């Protein structure tokens, strides 16, 4: 009995010491934004949390969002899922062997998928329990794409594979993987050159770009061609979508807006330099960051320039009063746009360089930042109790309706009837 008590005591002491050490490291290395600084710009810290990480030998590589969860991925392969509204940890999981290369994960309404090495893992979005894992047919070149029924894998050889999610789960439960994994494969689409960016899944279609300077869109169910488009130069960033429009950046300094169903060109924006990243699409605005160190805000419907700001890159969030961006020194920028005057002004440069891992949030008005050591912070504007949901407003939580118990009851009109 005594050795067991002693062992438990030693474990508790070790845990307390490690926790204290972690806190000391965080306090020594990370500068949390002071309240006075946030107050000056009507901002506040909504929550502060920490991912599961061994900061002595590991670092955060990706910060991925959906409407409900903030996912923190590390170089060693750990994934921590934090509640996006409270910062509470839902689960933490190591899906592959340590130091196995991973692409940024993806999620749908109930499943999280991640490619790690030559395997793909699926876990329950809410509990973190593993649903299945499968060996990949060949080395993938980017993160997968997924809808509610299928997953799509792109490879460096120029192929896109489609797998049936329900069939994969069935085979896994029957202990038939990986030998019978081919039974879950729906189709394979071949191109002659590598596919460098994640396919885009939407409305029963899957769209992807090959290094042949060709964009393909096929039916997700049977691989039949919906449209095919040749581009003058190679695609330089993942294709993104908003409603019925696709946005494609190419190496000739152009951003194309296409009809998502037919592939026809709706408008073209010509920048002063190459566009290395996908545009940020929020509300009716399209934010473009060319390589010349500028941020352009376009009307999403027409491509007309609304304003531009030099010294800013990318959009971390759009709040009630600010467009939140960053500069080349790592400062977080608060930009105040005046679209009527076609101008914008940098209101503040927040020195948050310790929080160098940043999510470009097109889903809500919250700002999510992380440190390489695993600290995660969520900022918001004051007075906004519930987040604004841009892409999927149906996922916004119901707001409570308050009534005044002291309010006088309405007086019924006496009509003289009994």
Image: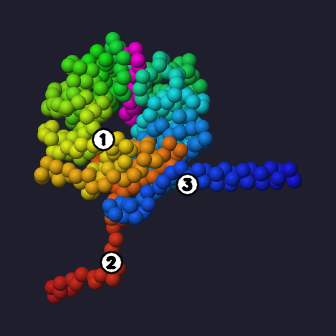
Eyeballing the image, is 341 above or below 208?
Answer: below
Marking on residue 27: 3
Label annotation for residue 313: 1
Q: How many marks?
A: 3
Task: Tell me if I can see residue 67 in this picture.
Answer: yes
Of tags 2 and 1, the one toward the viewer is: 1
Instruction: Please tell me how crowded label 1 is: few (under 14), some (14-19), or many (20+) other residues with Cα within 10 Å.
Output: many
Residue drawn where x is 51% and y is 49% of the image: 375
Of 332 and 392, which appears nearest the observer? 332
Q: Residue at x 33, y 21 (%)?
A: 222
Which stretch is magenta? 144-159
Q: Position of residue 86 (x, y in %)?
A: 46, 56
Work out how far the residue at label 2 is from the one at label 1, CA to CA, in angstroms: 47 Å
Q: By what rule are the colours in the image chosen? A: rainbow
Q: Are marks 3 and 2 in contact (CB under 8 Å)?
A: no
- Verify CB contact (< 8 Å) between mark 3 and mark 1: no
Helix, strand or loop status at disc 2: loop
Q: Locate residue 384, reporting x and y percent.
A: 33, 61
Q: Which mark is residue 145?
A: none
Where is residue 309 shown, x and y percent of the image? 22, 45
Q: Is residue 145 magenta?
A: yes
Where 406 sits versus 329, above or below?
below
Tell me: 43 left or right of 185.
left
Kindly give the residue lying farthest to the front in the view shown: 329
Q: Is residue 219 visible?
A: no
Image quadrant where one finds the C terminus: bottom left
Q: Which callout, 3 or 2, points to the residue nearer the camera?
A: 3
Gap between marks 3 and 1 measured at Cα: 29 Å
Residue of label 2: 404
């Amino acid at each position: 009995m005594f050795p067991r008590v002693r062992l438990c005591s030693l474990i508790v002491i070790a845990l307390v010491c490690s926790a204290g050490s972690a806190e000391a490291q965080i306090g020594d290395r990370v500068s949390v934004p002071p309240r006075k600084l946030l107050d000056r710009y009507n901002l506040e810290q909504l929550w502060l949390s920490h991912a599961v990480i061994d900061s002595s030998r590991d670092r955060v590589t990706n910060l991925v969002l959906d409407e409900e969860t903030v996912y923190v991925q590390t170089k060693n392969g750990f994934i921590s899922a934090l509640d996006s509204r409270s910062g509470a940890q839902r689960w933490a999981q190591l899906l592959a062997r340590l130091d196995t290369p991973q692409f940024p994960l993806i999620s749908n309404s109930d499943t999280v998928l991640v490619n790690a090495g030559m395997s793909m893992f699926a876990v329950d979005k809410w509990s973190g329990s593993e649903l299945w894992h499968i060996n990949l047919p060949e080395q993938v070149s980017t993160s997968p794409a997924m809808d509610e029924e299928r997953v799509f894998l792109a490879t460096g050889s120029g192929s896109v594979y489609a797998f049936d999610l329900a069939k994969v789960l069935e085979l896994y439960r029957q202990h038939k993987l990986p030998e019978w994994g081919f039974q879950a494969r729906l189709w394979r689409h071949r191109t002659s050159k590598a596919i460098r960016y994640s396919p885009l899944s939407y409305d029963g279609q899957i769209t992807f770009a090959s290094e042949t300077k060709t964009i393909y869109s096929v039916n997700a169910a049977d691989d039949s061609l919906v449209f095919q488009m040749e581009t003058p130069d190679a695609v330089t960033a993942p294709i993104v979508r908003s409603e019925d429009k696709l946005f494609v950046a190419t190496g000739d300094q152009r951003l194309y807006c296409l009809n998502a169903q037919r592939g026809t060109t709706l408008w073209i924006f010509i920048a002063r330099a190459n566009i290395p990243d996908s545009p940020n699409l929020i509300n009716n605005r399209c934010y473009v960051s060319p390589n010349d160190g500028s941020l352009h805000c376009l009307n999403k419907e027409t491509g007309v320039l609304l304003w531009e700001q030099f010294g800013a890159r990318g959009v971390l969030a759009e709040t009630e009063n600010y467009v939140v961006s960053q500069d080349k020194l790592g400062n977080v920028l608060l930009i105040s746009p005046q679209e009527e005057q076609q101008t914008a002004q940098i209101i503040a440069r927040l020195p948050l360089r310790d929080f160098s891992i940043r999510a470009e949030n097109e889903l809500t008005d919250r700002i999510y930042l992380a440190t390489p050591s695993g600290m995660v912070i969520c900022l918001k504007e004051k007075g906004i109790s519930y987040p604004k949901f841009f892409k999927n407003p149906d996922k916004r939580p119901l707001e409570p309706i308050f009534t005044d118990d002291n309010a006088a009851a309405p007086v019924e009109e006496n009509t003289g009837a009994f």
